[in-house]
Amino acid sequence: MSPTQEQKEMVMIRYKMALAGLAAALLASTPAAATLPQGARAPAIATQGALAGRTFAFDLQRALRQGPVVLYFYPKAFTQGCTLEANAFAESMDEFRAAGAQVVGLSADDLPTLKRFSTEECRDAFPVAIATPATIRAYDVAFTREGKDTGLASRTSYVIGQDGRIAMVHSDLDWREHVSRTLATVQAMKRR
C-alpha cells in the first residue's frame, strides 16, 4: 500500500522540523563570535595568574611596552582541546619570543588550577591568567550553550599591537589554527 499525499506531507514536515531542531542545537552550543574588530582598542586587563606554578601578575598595558601580546582565551583548563592548545603554544614559544611577542592564556579557572595548568600543560613556557567576568564581557568572548552564558570564555585569540590596538582576532572552538594564525601575525608585525 502506498502512502497518501497527507502522509507524505506529514513526513516532510517532521523532516523539516528535525533539521530545524538540529540546526538550532548546533547554533546554541557554539561559542559567541568575538566582535571586537581589528583596529579596535583592546580593553585594559590587570589580573593574577600563574607562570611555572608561581603566582604571576599581568597588566596588559605594562606588557605592551615590551612588544605585541597574544591573548588567547580558552574555556577550561585540563579539558582536551584546552590541553592540546596549551601544548601547541608551549611548543611554539621560541618562535613567539623571536618575534618579540608575549603569550598569555586567559580562562575563568581559579588560581590553584592555573598554577597546575601552567606547569603541567603550558610546560612552564608562558603564563595563564584569570579572565574575570568583566574581562570576558569586555573582550566579547562569553561561551554560551543553549543561549545561556556558561561563565566560561570561548576559544578566541587576539593579537594586540604595541599601540594597544587589535591586530588580529580568531574565534573558533577548534584549537588547531590559533597558534599558527597568531604566530603569523606577530611575525608579520616584526618584519614591518
Image (spheres, rainbow, N blue to C red):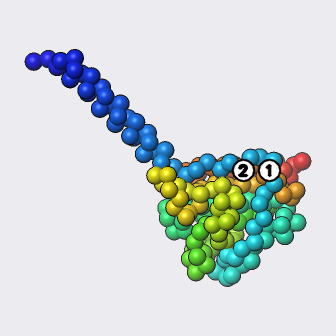
Q: Which residue is drawn at the image coordinates 55% and 64% (left, top)?
A: 151
- Mark 2 and mark 1 in contact? Answer it, CB < 8 Å: yes
Q: Which residue is mark 2?
A: 36
Label 2: which secondary element = loop
Front in this rendered view, residue 83 or 56: 56
Compare residues 150 and 169 and report the one nearer the observer.
Answer: 150
The outermost residue toward the left is 1
Residue on which disc 1 sits = 40
Q: Residue at x 72, y 50 (%)?
A: 36
Examine the rendering and report whether any part of residue 83 can be seen: no
Residue 104 x/y as whole percent:
70, 66
For the residue carrying disc 1, how many other residues have a C-alpha within 10 Å: few (<14), some (14-19), or many (20+)? few
- Rendered image quadrant of residue 46: bottom right
SS assignment at label 1: loop
Residue 111 percent coordinates (x, y): 61, 78
| Residue at (20% x, 23% y) in the render | 7
Q: Which mark is residue 137?
A: none
Distance, label 2 to label 1, CA atoms, is 7 Å
Seen in the image, is 66 located left or right of residue 82?
Answer: right
Classify 24 as above or below 161.
above
Q: Position of residue 119 (x, y in %)?
A: 61, 76
Name the amino acid, label 2. Leu
Looking at the rendered image, the quarter that the N terminus falls into is top left
Please report the residue visible at 81 percent of the width from the left and 54 percent of the height from the top. 41
At which x and y percent is residue 158? Answer: 72, 55
Q: Is residue 48 visible?
A: yes
- Three-letter code for the amino acid on which mark 1 is drawn: Ala
Tell me: 189 left or right of 126: right
The residue positioned farthest toward the front in the image shown: 6
Residue 100 placement, left or right of 80? right
